[in-house]
Amino acid sequence: MSDPVRKLNQLQQRATQIDNPLQLPLWHEEKRGVPNEVVRSALFNVRNRCVARREFKDEVIAVLSGDICITYSGTELRQDDMDVWMQLLHEARRQPLGQCVEIKPYEFLKDLRWSPTGYYYKKLREHLKRMKFTMLVVNSARLGREIGVSMIRKYECEGRDGEKLERWRIWIEPEVKALFGDVYYTRIDWQQRVKIKGNLAKHLHGVYSSHAQPYPYKVATILEGCGSDMRELRNFRVSLREALEELQRVGFIEHFQ
């Protein structure tokens, strides 16, 4: 391809990006959007905070769907990371991806139902740092290709002189849009989600929200797909029952067997 033709193609691509900027779907205020490939995987696992987070290096993540392959590099992510990431995506959905998203940390913590104290401000910064140093690689029949992306591109919590910013700045990678497509994402009921305390219950809330109709899973499949460190199926059954009972209490499911 000659240089003039190549330059013309590049200009046409840039013009298309300007006319059609990559933007997330505009779900309702009471919902939070998350890609189906992510919510049906163990990327955000259910291990509790008492266990030290491990480091992943291009490791395969368990997924409940057979036509999806996910690998991950970075510090282990859990359900509280998913809460933060979903809230970031929620804030970013009204503007083109790649642009700076400004958040007021006080209001952000309130949306997460976290107390606006020093502990939680520090915790929020730790989540942002953890998601900055990640590499998520997704390959599925739906995508038709392999996509590698960081959970967030970068963030700013302080000015150059170390002064705390009233509004924190976060950038989301434009490639995240491909994971959502137009319809390949789940709308999580946020009011239910923030009432759920258990990590396994949160995971199941996301998984079952991603199906239009109830879908039966084997207990062993759920154990593998949630990223739990339990090994005995009989012990996991106890935790699973408790998680399902919690989903009953918040009004997500009527009954289970």
Image (spheres, rainbow, N blue to C red):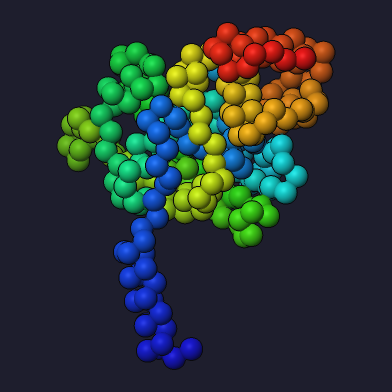
Q: Is residue 36 left or right of residue 65?
A: left
Residue 175 x %, y % = 47, 54
* Residue 147: quarter of image: bottom right
Q: Nearer the viewer, residue 14 or 106?
A: 14
Q: Is residue 27 left or right of residue 51?
A: left
Q: Residue at x 42, y 50 (%)?
A: 173
> Image height check: is 2 above or below 248?
below
Say if residue 128 shows up in the picture: no
Q: Residue at x 72, y 15 (%)?
A: 256
Say if residue 237 shows up in the picture: yes
> Image height check: is 76 above or below 250?
below
Q: Which of 187 and 225 is in front in this view?
A: 187
> Image height check: is 14 above or below 81?
below
Q: Which residue is drawn at 51% across and 37% down?
A: 34
Q: Is residue 95 left or right of residue 45?
A: left
Q: Which residue is drawn at 56% across and 45% down?
A: 184
